[in-house]
Image: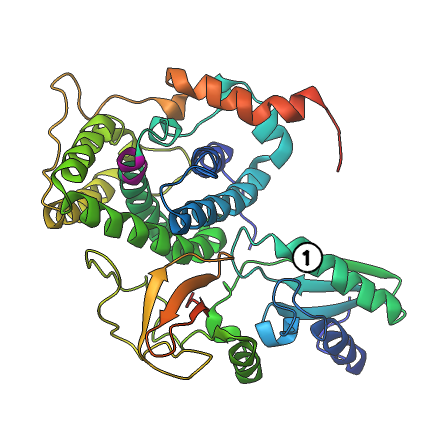
Amino acid sequence: MTTTVPTTAALALGDDALVLSHRLGEWAGRAPVLEEEVALANIALDLLGQARVLLSLAGDEDELAYLREERAFRNLQLVEQPNGDFAHTIARQLFFSTYQHLLYARLAAGDGPFAPLAAKAVKEVAYHRDHAEQWTVRLGDGTEVSHERMQRACAALWRYTGEMFQPVEGLDVEGEKLRADWLESVGDVLRRATLTLPEGPQSGAWTAGAGRQGLHTEPFGRMLAEMQHLHRSHPGATW
Amino acid sequence: MVTGTTTLEAELLRVAGSVPDPELPVLTLQELGVLRAVHLRDADAVEVELTPTYTGCPALEAMSVDIERALHEHGIRDVTVRTVLTPAWSTDDITPEGRRKLREFGIAPPRVRRDSGPVALELGPTRTLTEETEPVRCPHCGSADTELLSRFSSTACKALRRCLACREPFDHFKEL
C-alpha cells in the first residue's frame, strides 16, 4: 500500500518520541536506584527507535533531529519539560505514555501510513504505561513525602496535558474521545494512588501549550543546545 | 523480479538464518524469528527482509552487517537488507528450539501470549504479587516461585527476575 505520509503528523509524533527520549536519557547516571536507571534508559531507547522511524517518514532523520531550530520542532510542550524530581518524571511518563498508548492503538487499528509503526510501538508503550502507573500508585500511596511530591508533580504538569487532544493535520483521531479515554484512565490510576485529579489554573487549563505550532517553553532551548551541539560542532563526523 | 521461493532462495534464507544474534549469540536469527524473507533480484543480488524485535533495537545494524557478510561468503555479490515492520515481531515468533536454547543459556524464555493486546496491568504497590498467566520458571533450578525485580533489564527485550527457591537473579525474555 502506498499512502502519502502527512509530514506534519510524522514530525509531531517523531518529535514527541525524540524529545522525551532525550529527557529520559538525562537520568542516566543519576536515577534513584539501578533498576530505574535501566528502566528509564530502556524506555528512552524504545522512544528513540520510534523517533527514527517517524522522522525518516518526514525526511532525513539526522538533519531533522540535529539541524532544526527550536521553532521547527512540533513536539508537545509536555515532553520537553525538565525531569524535575523523580515524581515529575513519573507524572510526565504517566500523562504521555497513556496518551501515546491510546493514540497508537487507534493508529494501529487503521490502515494509514502510521499503522505499521503504531502496531509495533503500541506493544512497547504498553510497558512504559505500566511502568508509569505502577510508580504513580507506589509514590502516591507511599509515604507522606512521596504522596505530596507526586501530587505536586501532577499539578505542575497538568497545564500541558490539554495540548495532546488538539487536532494534528494528517492524524485521523477523534480528539475529544481520546481525551475522555485518557481522563478515565489517568483518573483511575490517580484514584488508586490516593491522589486527586488536578483542576488546573482557571485561565485556560486545557488550552495552554502550543508545541505543535512550534512554540516551546524556555527549558527546551537549553535541551536542544545540549542535544545538537556535538553534531553541529563536528558536521559530518563519523566514529 | 523473481516471484515465489526458489530453491536458491530457500538455501540463502538458511545461510542468513544461521547467523547468530549479536546480543544473544546462542540464538540464530532464524530461531529468533526476525528474518522474514530472502528475495533473489539477480543471479548474484539478493534482498533480505529483516524485522526488529523492538523498534529501537540497536542490534539491528549489527545483524544487517553479519547477514551481508554471510551471504557475501556464500558468493552473493550484492546484498540489500531491508527493515520491515509489518507484521510486527512478537516473542511468539521465537521457535521452540530457540526457547530451549534461551533456557539453557540462563534466560527464561517468553511465555506464549494469549492475545496481542496490551500487557496486563498489575498495580501492586511494590513487586508483582500475582501472575495471571503461567509462571515464569527459573532457568537455573526450574522453580515456578520467582518474582519480578524490574520490567526492564540488560536489554529492552528482557525483564529482571529473582528465583525465590535458589535465590539466583535471572533475565526473562519478556512477552511482546
Q: In the image, which residues are magenta?
A: A86-90
The image quadrant that residue B68 belongs to is bottom right
Residue A173 image position (x, y, % from top left): 32, 43
The residue at the point 39 percent across, 26 percent down is A212
Against B56, is B14 above or below?
A: below
Q: Is residue A111 left or right of residue B62?
A: left
Q: Is residue B105 visible?
A: yes
Of all residues, the one furthest to the front in this rendering is B167
Name the one closer to the observer, A226 or B86: A226
Q: In which quadrant is the C terminus of chain B drawn?
A: bottom left
Q: Residue at x 44, y 53 (%)?
A: A121
Q: Position of residue B156 (x, y in %)?
A: 49, 56
Give the total of numbered labels. Answer: 1
Q: Main secondary structure of the magenta part?
A: helix
Residue B37 versus residue A220 in the image, above or below:
below
Image: B38 above or below A127: below
